[in-house]
Image: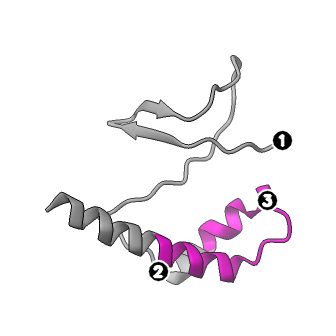
């Protein structure tokens, strides 16, 4: 089984945009999403990275968790600033 990554926008449980065509067959997906109203602990971020690290070779889960948290917090702050 191969892993591929696609970016999508989902609103109210429905896909509104996806950046590539998906195969015309049944596929299994894992959805990892940004919730601007929720802040995850470092332990939770580390868990998410470990659960999804099978699609990346030689990932350093601790380093990636720190980087993702910094990115998510930066994006959340800039997203909230745009909403004002």
Instruction: Estimate the x, y position of residue 41 in percent, counting from the top left.
Output: 46, 80
Please tell me whether residue 42 belongs to the stretch shown in magenta: no
Q: Which residues are magenta?
A: 47-71
Please tell me whether residue 49 belongs to the stretch shown in magenta: yes
Q: Label 2: how many residues lie within 10 Å, few (<14), some (14-19) or many (20+)?
A: few
**Residue at 22% of width from left, 67% of height from top?**
81
Residue at which label 1 appears: 2
Vertical side of 57 occupied by 6: above or below: above
Vertical side of 76 occupied by 46: above or below: below
Q: Label 3: how many residues lie within 10 Å, few (<14), some (14-19) or many (20+)?
A: few
Q: Is residue 79 left or right of residue 44?
A: left
The chief SS type of the magenta part is helix
Report how far apart the C-alphas of labels 3 and 1 lie in the structure. 11 Å
Q: Earlier in the sequence, mark 3 or mark 1?
A: 1
Instruction: Estimate the x, y position of residue 8 in percent, counting from the top left.
Output: 50, 40
Q: Nearer the viewer, residue 8 or 28?
A: 8
Residue at which label 2 appears: 41
Q: Are marks 3 and 1 in contact (CB under 8 Å)?
A: no
Report how far apart the C-alphas of labels 1 and 2 lie in the structure. 30 Å
């Amino acid at each position: 089984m191969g892993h591929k990554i696609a970016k999508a926008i989902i609103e109210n449980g429905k896909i509104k945009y996806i950046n590539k065509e998906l195969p015309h067959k049944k596929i299994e997906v894992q959805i990892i999403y940004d919730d601007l109203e929720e802040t995850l602990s470092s332990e939770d971020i580390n868990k998410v990275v470990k659960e999804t690290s099978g699609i990346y070779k030689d990932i350093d889960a601790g380093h990636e968790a720190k980087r993702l948290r910094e990115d998510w917090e930066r994006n959340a702050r800039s997203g909230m600033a745009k909403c004002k």
